[in-house]
Image (cartoon, rainbow, N blue to C red):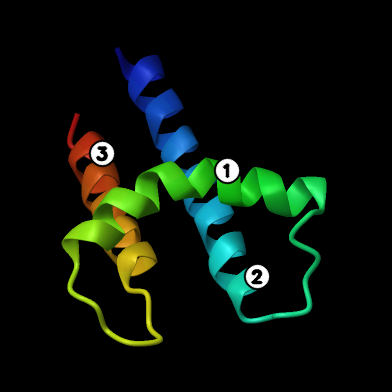
């Protein structure tokens, strides 16, 4: 069971890194969105961010959905560490 929890924790950590990359990419408007790496990052994160973005109220230019996902992942990782 410990190996499964470790694997889930590693996958959550990797997703956090991908999500961080997406957040950083949004700061650079000149990034080529047709790049395979950028496409991969957006394809991996959008299915998680879209439902949260629909739930959150509109806040103008700011998208708080990545912040919500980071908090959820940290909560999950904290719970997993208890086992």
Please tell me the numbered disc located at residue 25.
Answer: 2
Q: Secondary structure at mark 3?
A: helix
Q: Secondary structure at mark 1?
A: helix
Which residue is at a point 72% across and 54% down the rendered structure image?
38
Which residue is at a point 37% across and 75% down the rendered structure image?
63
Which residue is at a point 67% across and 43% down the rendered structure image?
40
Question: Disc 1 to disc 2, how far (Cα)?
Answer: 13 Å
Q: Quadrant of residue 36?
A: top right
Up-down relation of residue 36 to residue 21 (above or below): above
Pointer 2 or 3: first along the chain: 2
Q: How crowded is the residue under tag 3: few (<14 C-alpha within 10 Å), some, or many (20+)?
A: few
Q: Which residue is mark 3?
A: 81
Please tell me the numbered disc located at residue 43.
Answer: 1
Residue 19 appears at what percent x and percent y? 51, 56
Q: Residue furthest top?
A: 1
Q: Nearer the viewer, mark 2 or mark 3?
A: 2
Q: How crowded is the residue under tag 1: few (<14 C-alpha within 10 Å), some, or many (20+)?
A: few
Q: Secondary structure at mark 2?
A: helix
Up-down relation of residue 56 to residue 43 (above or below): below
Q: Which quadrant of the figure contains the C terminus?
A: top left
Question: Mark 1–mark 2 contact, CB under 8 Å?
Answer: no
């Amino acid at each position: 069971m410990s190996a499964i929890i470790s694997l889930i924790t590693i996958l959550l950590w990797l997703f956090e890194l991908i999500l961080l990359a997406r957040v950083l990419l949004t700061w650079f408007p000149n990034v080529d969105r047709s790049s395979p790496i950028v496409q991969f990052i957006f394809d991996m994160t959008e299915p998680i961010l879209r439902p949260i973005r629909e739930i959150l109220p509109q806040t103008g230019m700011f998208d708080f959905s990545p912040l919500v996902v980071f908090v959820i992942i940290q909560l999950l990782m904290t719970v997993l560490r208890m086992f």
